[in-house]
Structures are given as C-alpha cells and as structure tokens.
Amino acid sequence: MHPFAPWRYGALLLLPLLPLAAGPARAAENRSNAPVRAATLYPEGAEVVRNLRVELPAGRREVIIEGLPADLDTASIRIVVKPGDLFDLRGFTSRLRPAAAYVGPRERELQREIERLGDEIRLREDRVRAARIQLRLVERIGEAAADLASRELAAGRPEPGAWRKSWEAVGSGAIEILEVIRQNERETRELQRRLDAKRRELEQLRTGARATTELVLDLEAEEDATASIELRHAVEQAGWSPFYEARLRSRRGEISLVRRARAWQKTGEDWRGIALRLSTTRPRNTVVAPELDPWFVDIVEIGPMARDRAFRPGGVPEAEMALSAAAPAPPVVRRIGEFHTTFTVSKPLDLLADGSERMLTLTRDKLPADLLVEIVPKVDPAPYLTARFTYEEADPLLPGPIRLVRDGAYVGETDLEFVVAGQEIRLGFGRDDKVEVNHRLDTDFKSEEGIIQSYRRIERRWVTRVRNRHKRSLPIVVYDRLPIPRDERITVELLADGTPPTEREVDGKPGVLGWRYEYEPGEVREIRFGFAVTFPKDLRVTDF
C-alpha cells in the first residue's frame, strides 16, 4: 500500500493501472495538457487537481495527457470523467518521455557545474552532521567524567591532575569540532550563492526539455460529446511549514500572535492561478498505533573477550526570518475539523517550481498577557521580560519558529512547541534595561564543630538588590536554589536571617526558590538568601 495516498479510499473510483486492452479500431489519439488547477499542501507532500475538456466523437478513443511529472505517483491517481452516463473509462496506462539532452555547450557546462556544486554542498552538510554527532559524544564524555569525579570525591580518591587533563581534552575537542562546523557552514553558504547564480544563468539559457510522463486514457463515448476530465494525484516535492510572530505591546499587556505559512513546491512545473489549500494532516506519518512485544530479561554471562569489547574505549557508537513585503498575501479562510484544520486561500495564486516560498498569513489573534521580569542571578544577573498567555483557539499550533517583537523592536527568535487549546505559552522578550540588578556574595563562612565526631559547616549568603526604573508597577521575581543532598549524612538548611521566599519548588523543581513582588515605580528591594551545609569532616562534598 502506498504510504502517501490517504484519498484512495474516497467515494470515487480508483482505477488500477492497466495496459490498454486490444479492442476495436480507435480514432486518432487526442493529445492535451492538464495544468494544475488546485492543490492541497500538507506539511510533507501534496495532492494536486488537474482539469481538461476534450471534444470526443462516439466510440472508443485514446486521450493522452501530456507534460505530467516524470515521477508521477501512479498509485495515488484518481480520475473522474463527466458526464458519467456518456463516458466509460476502461483503464489507463503511463509512459515516460525522457528529456532531450541539453542542446547548447554552455547549458551542458552549467549543468555539470551545478551538479558539482550540489555535491560539494552535500559533502559539507555531511561533515556538519558528522561533527554534530562527535560533539554530542564529547558532551556525553564530559558528563560521564563529571559523574566519575563526583564518585571519586565521595570515595576519598580524588585525582585532580587526571580531572584537569580530562576537562582540557573535552574542552579542546569541543572547540575543534565547533570550528569544523563553522568552517563548513561558511563554505556551504558561499557554495549555495554560487549554485543559485549558476541555476539562474541556466534558466535563462536552457533549451532542452525535462523528462515527463504521459497518461493514456482508454475512453468510450456513447455519442459525440465534451468530456470533462479531472485528474488527482499525490506529489512529494511540495509542502508547507508554519512559522509565527508574537508582537508584544507591553503597556497594554497584549500579545498579537500571527500564524503564517511557507508554501513551496519543486515539481519542475509552475503552478499558476491555482486554488490553494493548506491542511494540517500529515499523510506520511504512521497511521496505526505501535504494538508492544513481550520484554524478556535474563542474566548475561560476559566472558573475558566480550567484556573487553564491551568496555573498550571508542566502542561508543557515533551516533532572522525575512518577511516579504512585495505583495500582500490574499486572505485565508480557516475551517476547523474534528481531527485537522484546513486553510483555503480565497484568491488564485502562483506557486513556482523553483522552490521559492510563498508566504501566507493564516490567522491573527490578540491575547491578554501577564508580564513578568525574571532574574536568575546565580546564572545571569540580567533581568529578562517574560510574557505568559493562554492559547484559546480550537485548532492546535504546529511546531515552528516564532519571531519575537517587543513594542515594535525585533528582539530574537525561538521555537514554539506543539500547542493545544487551553495551554499556557511562555515567551521571553529579551532583557529589560529599566530594571537594575546588583548581585553579590555577602558571606562565605566555614567552621567545624562536634566532640566525638567532627562536622564541617559551610554558610553562604547572597544579597540581590533590585530597582524598578519603569514609570509603572511591574511584577519582578528573583530565582535561586538550595542544594539538594543525595546522602543522608549531608544536611542543608535555609538560613532564618534571609528573606523568606514567596515560592518553593518553582515549576516542580526541588530546591528552586522564588521571591516575587509587585514593584512600584522607583521601588528598591533587597533579597537576602543564605543556606548552611553540614557534613562529616572526613567527607568530600561536591561544590563545597
């Protein structure tokens, strides 16, 4: 069964691909083109509709539809001939017509250069992918080394010299890999510019034709009549992807969420004046829930050779968006179904075969947002403006990049995950320069106590001073954290002389504390935070 033909089970007849049977003599063949008149784009792939009208005399006749894609998916074809009481479609077959060779010497030269540049780009993309695999491996090695160092400290067998060599090796390895990635990405951009220039030159010069498919219909007419033929089929080199823009109006506490789409196709055939629909259906995804097989566990006996292979070093497997303002996009009508959403463009448009993206605005929503300035001085003392709002629309938002604009100024871009109705969305809108933060270590005190068994006690205190320089009140929260002991011999306490936190276990994270207050214009607050860690003197504890 073809994985990309969800429509084959529709009410219309799907005819099998049959050779034309021998039969009575036919009149001369009728040749016609059937340009794309409508298309439904999915996140991956599309279904197109072609229409043609032909005058046919009574009797049996071949109708040949020319100029179809060379990679026509015959398994997805549906054909309807109207009026159905006058015409009988007995079958159809397809045949490939190869392209003529490039006629001019310059065309042949350009084609060779385009192929070479494409190979060079793919080579560098492969190098980047391989380097990213290596980088993930280095990260895992660094994490494993950190865990090993912690265990050695806990066991009283520290080897600082070995640790230094390990982190220096990991650091230098990561730097080398990142430089490889940067170099290959720079080369890829330059090669892509050259490739685009060669393609434009070839497009101006080319005289040869592309390979195409002909579809031969075996039609029988009851009488002389005009046949209206509709041909539907799937294409793979087309699709659409969502992207978003969130515009924050801070004084109003309002988010304008704009959902847009990039529509494209690379079928080799321009689609002009088509009726376009976008659908959130994903026909290429698995359509059946997976099954679970029994999970058996057993004892594995590892012999000397197998043990050596299992633990041998190196045995780990390697595993600003430009918004075009040239032409306003036509309005789009949204229809929300039980399982998917469709967006129908209200006016015909062109979708060219060169892969150029057509930008469409799908929806615009204005949503109330709660603003909050967040400060995490332990990591970065800078204040960041965050907006939280609830998405209330019935249809979900597909994952995609989201462009962030604060009071008319572009501040950055992030990724939006899959969002359903009623879900809270949290977006950061960059640094808030009108909130002043000063964070410092106040005391770092160490002492020993105990008679029978000696304990080490470490007290640390910090002071975070926050000033609101806005001309309006604003909620500001400072986050910090308590250490979480993993050994019962370690005790941690929040010091009583600090500012009591207003939130504990923020976002369900143990040890994370918050101090949230409404700051009036010009208001200054000092957040005092401290903790004490106590453990037996003969133990070594990480970070203390």
Image: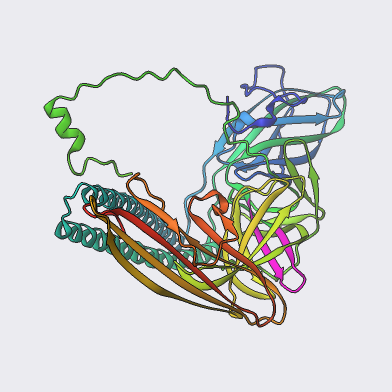
Q: Is the magenta region chiefly helix, strand or loop?
A: strand
Q: Does the magenta segment cover residue 250?
A: yes
Locate residue 378: give its quadrant: bottom left
What residue is shown at x 17% (from left), y 39% (from top)? 312
Q: Which is nearer the eye, 1 or 331? A: 331
> Where does residue 288 sit, x and y in percent of width and height?
59, 26
Q: Does the magenta segment cover residue 403?
A: no
Q: Is residue 402 in sight in this rendering?
A: yes
What residue is shown at x 60% (from left), y 42% (from top)? 69
Picture layout, residue 108 above or below residue 508: below
Picture layout, residue 303 above or below residue 456: above
Magenta region: 241-259
Q: Is residue 356 in sight in this rendering?
A: no
What residue is shown at x 23% (from left), y 50% (from top)? 452
What residue is shown at x 12% (from left), y 28% (from top)? 305
State the residue lying farthest toward the left: 304
Q: Which is nearer the eye, 314 or 300? A: 300
Q: Relative to 34, is 191 on the left or the right?
A: left
Q: Which is nearer the eye, 316 or 97? A: 316
Image quadrant occupied by the N terminus: top right
- The colour mode here is rainbow
> Where does residue 33 sit, x and y in percent of width and height?
70, 43
Q: Relative to 6, is 367 on the left or the right?
A: right
- Count of marks, rendered view: 0
> Where does residue 454 sit, x and y in percent of width and height?
24, 54
> Where does residue 293 sit, x and y in percent of width and height?
46, 19
Locate residue 358: give its quadrant: bottom right
Image quadrant occupied by the C terminus: bottom left
